[in-house]
Amino acid sequence: MTLTEMLTATFERRERLQAEEPNHKIWACGENFEIDGVGKVFCCIEIAQGAQTFMRPHFRRNWKLNGKRISAAKLQEIVGA
């Protein structure tokens, strides 16, 4: 599974949760993925307000591999995607 597929699945999960609770703002959402030969990957997205007030909110992405935080670039090397 590639990082893009993991992000897409996490965004889809957030959309499902938001559809179930339209009056409740989903600020953060995460999902676990089990990858053979790599381990357990956790993808978390959260809404982050820009530094300037005129920037629209965007998503911050956090990755964890086997419970330890890892950069997207290093994870991409390990996953091979």
Image (cartoon, grey):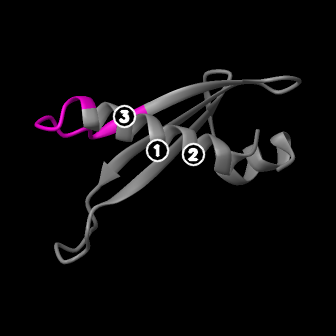
Question: Gap between marks 2 and 3, in whole Å?
Answer: 14 Å
Task: Locate residue 66, reporting x and y percent.
Answer: 68, 21
Residue positioned most to the left: 23
Sequence order check, earlier mark of 3 and 1: 1
Q: Is residue 30 above or below residue 4?
A: above
Q: Which residue is mark 1?
A: 11
Categorize mark 1 by other alpha carbons within 10 Å: few (<14), some (14-19), many (20+).
some
Q: Which residue is mark 2?
A: 7
Main SS, magenta region, reads: loop
Distance from disc 1 to disc 2, alpha carbons, whole Å, reads: 6 Å
Q: Which residues are magenta?
A: 20-29
Mark 1 residue element: helix
The residue that label 3 is drawn on is 16
Q: Is residue 77 above or below residue 70?
A: below
Residue 62: image x %, image y %? 52, 42
Left or right, 14 with respect to 55, comes to right
Asked if the residues shown at circle 1 and circle 2 are in contact, with their CB atoms under 8 angstroms apart, the answer is yes
> Looking at the image, which residue is at 63% across and 40% down?
6
